[in-house]
Amino acid sequence: MTAVIGIDAGGTSTKGALVDASGTISDRVDLPTDTEAATKTVLDVADRLLDAAGVAGIEVVAVGVGAAGFVDHSAGEVTFSPNSVYGDPHIKAAVEARVSLPVVVDNDANAAVWGERAFGAARGCDHVAMLVIGTGIGSGFILDGAMLRGWTGAGAEFGHVVIDPSGPRCPCGLRGCLEQLASGEAIGRMGREAAQDDPDTLMVELAGSAAQITGPHVAAAAARHDDAAVRVLRRAGRALAIGMSNVVNVFDPQLLVLGGGAVDAGEPFLGVARDELARMTTAQRRRPVRVDLTALGDDAGILGAAALAMDDRKREGKR
Amino acid sequence: MTAVIGIDAGGTSTKGALVDASGTISDRVDLPTDTEAATKTVLDVADRLLDAAGVAGIEVVAVGVGAAGFVDHSAGEVTFSPNSVYGDPHIKAAVEARVSLPVVVDNDANAAVWGERAFGAARGCDHVAMLVIGTGIGSGFILDGAMLRGWTGAGAEFGHVVIDPSGPRCPCGLRGCLEQLASGEAIGRMGREAAQDDPDTLMVELAGSAAQITGPHVAAAAARHDDAAVRVLRRAGRALAIGMSNVVNVFDPQLLVLGGGAVDAGEPFLGVARDELARMTTAQRRRPVRVDLTALGDDAGILGAAALAMDDRKREGKR
């Protein structure tokens, strides 16, 4: 029996698993990312999964890695990552040297959309857009069956499309990026700001103090009908709608998939975003856009990295 | 000798010509667009060019049409056009019925970028973005050698990417589209607004009255160092830079081509846009982006429509 290793290298944790051709996962590994040497964590995850495969009698035939940040897919190199230092940015070369197998490295959101098409919400679709709304906002786009990577692999960064020039500063260096207005981190920041004006908000009680409010506190307070928290989520939802409308005007996708932790923030966020997007597409006399939530959830990155490695093998004529 | 007919169907005029395989143009036709029946003008231009080809002994083998608006390329249909009524939106069927030749219909900015790659500024480039800054802002994108069209052909509308949610209303139905902040029409509108506050501006003298100021008046006044006009162009240039930065973050192009009449507005517009884009890409630690002006100028649409028709024939195995 054969499998590929799929690894999802995020700013907080690096997760991996063995994945077979049908997308079935086994032998999960989840390590905290060494943010000063993230490549080392990827190597540790790969080592553990190779050991597990050996024990189970599974032959590993390739490795796929999805990494947060700007990734040069052809070189297998992370060229910029706001939350991690990759020490050695040449992940592909480092993993190949360690495992002596074909290695594919791509941006984590690219991996996620590839995973949704292989095994999830976007099966059978050749025009797919995905926004991964976590701490930041990643994006992946499949156009006519092919991944959008750009000339140097630094494309598909829809989270850094500026939608409000007077908006907050982004760690990327710009101001008013979508990521600063609709991500989990943005929701937390807006929650903290709202708590300044409204110290009685449930968000403060849940977080312990205004300064400790994060995205999940906002979502939890909104679920209990806290007005200030609901207002924050509605504001983030309207920003997300602008981002989705921009995706539609640029890519005209068959399907727009939303993933990442922030999709759990519930109706005041996603409901407002869907309603506002519908209003915008109607105003433009565009046909309604199908918006689905991720079918793979937290596993989209692992499964997508694995699917990329599988498809790379197929392209090279090995099965 | 053979040629194809290239037609550029704009909101004001519909231009066409015979184009040979090397991109040489002959027998130009330029008719005012019948905005209540724009398809009829396209047919009139095609008729005249067929007649001219007959006289010159040139065999016409195909027709390419670039049309302003949302175009469904596979159906050859204009689905929405803000400035024209197409009477019969099925341009492809109408032209085919008239000329009994293969007909290709695409968005005019898609045609323009295809023309720049075939005969102009983008020869040899497989990752090309183009913004056509005229009355409105059109856009065309070549990704890995293929045109971005989207699922229904209604993609590549970067002019309707919202970059300022509190910005002016756009005829498309949205608010704060790039087109409302950096197009020729936007420059004219900002000129009229500026003249309200500053009735002594040269723009008023050149236009006859504040209400009659258009983009070219702003550019002419700025060329003569009129402060209010320079401020308008600088503001539009900063908005264009945001649009270009957004293009870079989404597509990571090898080359960004600027076309359309507004590129003649000069340094206070394009210089500011280039400088601000450079500042933004440096802030993001991205590599500098090559930005070139159109090499085909007003002929980009005609030559691009012709190139699309030629490439369609090649794909179908005829030469």
Image: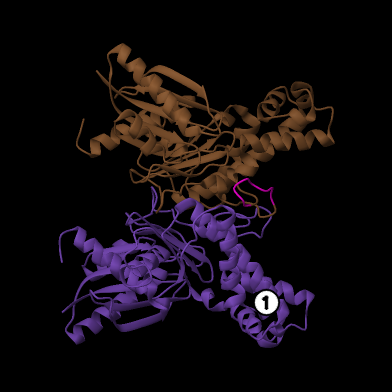
Chain colours: A purple, B brown
When asked about the image quadrant of residue B217, the answer is top right
Q: Residue at x 64, y 43 (%)?
A: B180
The foreground one among B233 and A59 is B233
Q: Residue at x 46, y 41 (%)?
A: B89
> How far across and down, in percent of the image, does residue B220 sit?
68, 23
Q: Is residue B314 above or below residue A60?
A: above
Asked if residue B171 lies in the magenta stretch, the reply is: yes
Looking at the image, can residue B160 be seen? yes
- According to the picture, the residue beneath numbered tag 1 turns out to be A230
When asked about the image quadrant of residue A218, the answer is bottom right
**Residue located farthest toward the top when viewing the structure as drawn:** B55
Q: Residue at x 20, y 62 (%)?
A: A314
> How far across and down, in percent of the image, does residue B260 sit?
53, 31
Q: Dot 1, how many residues are within 10 Å of its Cα: few (below 14), some (14-19), or many (20+)?
A: many
Q: Is residue A62 above or below residue B98?
A: below
Which quadrant is home to the N terminus of chain B? Answer: top left
Identify the chain of the residue marked 1, using the numbered disc in the image. A
Q: Is residue B303 above or below residue A130?
A: above
Looking at the image, can residue A96 be seen? no
Which quadrant is home to the C terminus of chain B? Answer: top left
> How far across and down, in percent of the image, does residue A290 sit?
46, 65
Asked if residue A268 lies in the magenta stretch, the reply is: no
Label 1 residue SS:
helix
Q: Specify start and end residues of the magenta stretch as a single range.
A: B167-174
Q: Is residue B142 above or below residue A315?
A: above
The foreground one among B34 and A143 is B34
Q: Is residue A289 left or right of residue B53?
A: right
The amino acid marked with disc number 1 is Val
Q: Is residue A66 left or right of residue B139?
A: left
> How far across and down, in percent of the image, does residue A54 sit?
19, 83
Magenta span dominant secondary structure: loop
Q: Is residue A3 left or right of residue B87?
A: left
